[in-house]
Structures are given as structure tokens and as C-alpha cells.
Image (spheres, helix red, strand yellow):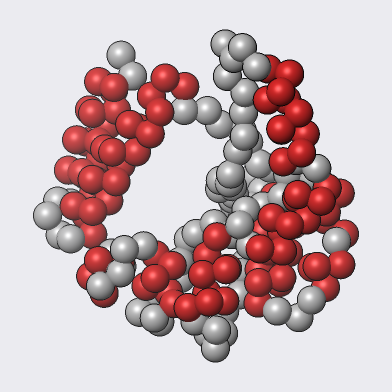
């Protein structure tokens, strides 16, 4: 059903996609610049996630670069000035055209960049429009940081490698997550 990137000598999904060992890679916009450089003749596109049959809402998992200011910072004014620069229209245009992340400005939805006939521009347009559909929900890791991913990643690896059944892996992951969130 699926493979892990390491199964084809790659360190991430984008690498496996670039060498055409997988048909689909669930990645962020950073894959676009990678594909431009590492697989320039690869024909690819992006599509929206399927709709939930009960709500008719498309699925969405938007994760991107973020900037923040520590609430305890002694330099909040200076940090805020930096954030203003990083989220400025010019900086967000630069991010959009480099395929680094989804820009944080809705005003870019009608940007001429999206009219370019390149795989990068068209993939970015699809993702940007999906993110603008009103069904993106913010999330926070709270005090768990990235620790919440460990049980899930282990479970996925064990299922995909045949070491555990889905039910076995889910039970263990749930126990570990419950313990983490006590």
C-alpha cells in the first residue's frame, strides 16, 4: 500500500517523489523548489484534499513557517518590528515565489504569480486557494512541543513495515499519548 522514503534510499517524501518511486507525496510548499532543482522534467500537480461526505467540507492540513514573539521577551517592540518586516507584502511575495511556504497575506490570492504556467505556480495556487476556503483551523502544540508526534510516527512506521497491525499500533500510540498529556 505504501512505502517509507528510506525503502527507496531517500530521507523524506519529496526525495521519493522526485525519483518517481511514489505517486503521491503529502508535503508543504518547500517541495516545489526542491522539485524545480532536483527533478526539473518531472510532470506533477497539486490537488485539494477530498471532501468530508457528512459536512461537504474539504480536508485541509496547512502547516507552514511561523514567527512569534516570546511573551517574556525584553525586546517586544524590536521583535514586533521584525515581524512586521517578515510579514510585509514584499517579504510574502518573495516567500511565495521561492516556494518556501504559504504566504500569510490573503491579498496575495489574486497575485499575478499564480497565472504563470509553471508547476510551482499552479501547485501554490491550488494550495493557497485551499487554505482560503475557510476551513483551516489553527492548532497549538502547547507544552508538548513535538513530543506528540513520536508515538504517531512510530505507529505509522511499524504498520507500514508490517511489524504491527493498525489496531496494535494505535493502541500503543494512544497509551503513550494519554501518558504524555497527563
In front of the other: 4 or 71: 71
Residue 135's spot in the image, x, y percent? 68, 42
Horizontal side of residue 63 vs 110, given as left or right? left
Residue 71 appears anywhere in the view: no
Where is residue 51 shown, x and y percent of the image?
61, 55
Residue 33 quadrant: bottom right
Tell me if residue 134 comes above or below residue 165 in the rendering: above
Total residue callouts: 0
Q: Is residue 147 above or below residue 154?
A: above
**Left or right of residue 175: residue 101:** right
Relative placement, left or right, of 181 versus 130 is: left
Q: Nearer the viewer, residue 78 or 54?
A: 78
Horizontally, residue 103 falls left or right of residue 24, namely: right
The answer to which image quadrant residue 167 occupies is top left
| Residue at (62, 34) in percent of width and height | 67
Q: Position of residue 158 (x, y in %)?
A: 18, 52
Amino acid at each position: 500500500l505504501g512505502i517509507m522514503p528510506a525503502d527507496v534510499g531517500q530521507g523524506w517524501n519529496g526525495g521519493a517523489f522526485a525519483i518517481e518511486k511514489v505517486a503521491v507525496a503529502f508535503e508543504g510548499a518547500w517541495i516545489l523548489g526542491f522539485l524545480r532543482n532536483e527533478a526539473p522534467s518531472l510532470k506533477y500537480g497539486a490537488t485539494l484534499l477530498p471532501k468530508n461526505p457528512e459536512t461537504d467540507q474539504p480536508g485541509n492540513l496547512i502547516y507552514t513557517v511561523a514567527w512569534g514573539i516570546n511573551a517574556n521577551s525584553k525586546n517586544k517592540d524590536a521583535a514586533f518590528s521584525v515581524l512586521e518586516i517578515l510579514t510585509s507584502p514584499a517579504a510574502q511575495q518573495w516567500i511565495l515565489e521561492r516556494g518556501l511556504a504559504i504566504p500569510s497575506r490573503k491579498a496575495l490570492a489574486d497575485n499575478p504569480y499564480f497565472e504563470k504556467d509553471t508547476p510551482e505556480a499552479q501547485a501554490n495556487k491550488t494550495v493557497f486557494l485551499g487554505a482560503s476556503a475557510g476551513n483551516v483551523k489553527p492548532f497549538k502544540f502547547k507544552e508538548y512541543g513535538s513530543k506528540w508526534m513520536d508515538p504517531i510516527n512510530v505507529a505509522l512506521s511499524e504498520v507500514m513495515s508490517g511489524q504491527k497491525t493498525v489496531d496494535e499500533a494505535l493502541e500503543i500510540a494512544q497509551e503513550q499519548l494519554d501518558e504524555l498529556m497527563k
